[in-house]
């Protein structure tokens, strides 16, 4: 397939786009002045062998203009190329970028927004990464377990202290066979609130997975289809997962802790138990 394919295939992931764009420039230099149908077919086939992103394609577009600029002598022509590059990149980034398949805002308190969130969770077909401060809302808990039951690869990360509080569903989720991790720092919270669905849909915002957040709190979520952003969140999730510890509290231990927390809460309120 020629120089461009060998260079493009040498990189299996698009994050090494800088190295790929250098190889791309080498290909362009070797073909400069030759825009025959055969050369263009080789160029297109090389592009198809990559897993391009908008950021990567922008870099490759810049590479084309850089190579052309090196072969231009007159300052006026170079200025014309810079002008052309600016407008082509603006066109590519704004008009040629595909519209997201999902773009939605959810606001709370509102049970309808909770139902909409559940609908999104129920759409997961392959993977569901849940990274939330706490889960005490049984409706959302059940949506996560439904995904697991239908074969979705579910992973859950939550805060270790919240897991010990009254009403926490983290141990329940773990007992259903869903891989679950909590943070390891007793002096800091795992305060994230995001979900990644099938590496394509990101749901994130201030919303905690509690009944209070649905019925009383002023909260928000944004739902967006963006595989590039999702990959960044997945990388972050994987790093947290590697550094945290699995949930190890047994059902008996969890019950004892919950009872102790409840008694302490009642004592502070001055109520008799």
Image (spheres, helix red, strand yellow):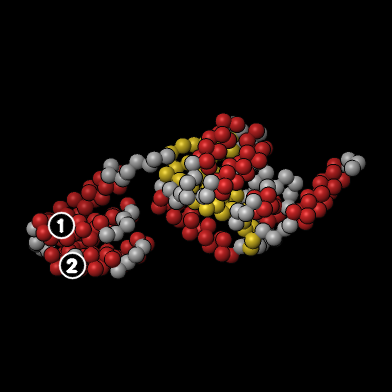
Number of callouts: 2
- The x, y position of residue 162, in whole percent, is 69, 51
Q: Examine the rendering and report whether any part of residue 202 can be seen.
A: no
In-front residue for pair 117/189: 117
Q: CA distance from mark 1 to mark 2?
A: 11 Å
Which quadrant, please, contains the C terminus? Answer: top right
Circle 2 Cα neighbour tier, 10 Å, few/some/many (<14 / 14–19 / ≥20):
few
The numbered dot on residue 251 is none
> Residue at left 60%, top 46%?
145
Q: Examine the rendering and report whether any part of residue 142 can be seen.
A: yes
Vertical comparison of 222 with 230: above or below:
above
Residue under label 2: 2
Q: Secondary structure at mark 2?
A: loop
In-front residue for pair 54/253: 253
In-front residue for pair 55/182: 182
Residue placed furthest toward the front: 150
Vertical comparison of 35 with 109: above or below:
below
Q: Is residue 197 left or right of residue 251?
A: left
Occupied quadrant, residue 142: top right
> Residue at left 56%, top 60%?
240
Occupied quadrant, residue 98: top left
The numbered dot on residue 41 is 1
- The x, y position of residue 102, in whole percent, is 42, 39
Q: Which numbered disc flags the more N-terminal residue, 1 or 2?
A: 2
Occupied quadrant, residue 155: bottom right
Which quadrant, please, contains the N terminus? Answer: bottom left
- The x, y position of residue 228, in whole percent, is 40, 52
Q: Secondary structure at mark 1?
A: helix
> Residue at left 64%, top 61%?
246
Q: Is residue 31 left or right of residue 271?
A: left
């Amino acid at each position: 397939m020629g120089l461009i394919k060998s260079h493009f295939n040498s990189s299996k992931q698009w994050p090494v786009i800088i190295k790929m764009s250098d190889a791309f420039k080498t290909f362009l230099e070797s073909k400069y002045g030759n825009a025959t149908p055969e050369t263009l077919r080789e160029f297109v086939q090389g592009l198809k062998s990559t897993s391009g992103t908008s950021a990567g394609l922008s870099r490759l577009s810049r590479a084309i203009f850089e190579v052309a600029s090196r072969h231009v002598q007159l300052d006026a022509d170079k200025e014309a190329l810079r002008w052309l590059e600016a407008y082509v990149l603006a066109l590519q980034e704004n008009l040629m970028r595909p519209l997201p398949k999902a773009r939605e805002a959810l606001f709370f308190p509102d049970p309808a927004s909770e139902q909409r969130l559940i609908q999104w969770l129920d759409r997961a077909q392959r993977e569901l990464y849940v990274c939330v401060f706490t889960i005490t809302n049984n409706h959302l808990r059940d949506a996560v377990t439904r995904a697991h039951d239908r074969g979705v690869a579910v992973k859950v990360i939550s805060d270790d202290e919240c897991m010990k509080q009254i009403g926490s569903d983290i141990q329940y989720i773990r007992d259903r066979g869903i891989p679950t991790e909590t943070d390891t720092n007793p002096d800091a919270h795992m305060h994230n609130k995001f979900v990644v669905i099938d590496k394509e849909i990101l749901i994130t915002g201030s919303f905690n997975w509690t009944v209070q957040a649905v019925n009383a709190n002023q909260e928000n979520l944004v739902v967006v289809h963006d595989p590039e952003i999702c990959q960044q969140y997945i990388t972050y999730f994987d790093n947290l997962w590697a550094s945290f510890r699995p949930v190890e509290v047994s059902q008996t231990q969890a019950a004892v802790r919950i009872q102790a927390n409840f008694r302490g809460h009642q004592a502070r309120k001055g109520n008799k138990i």
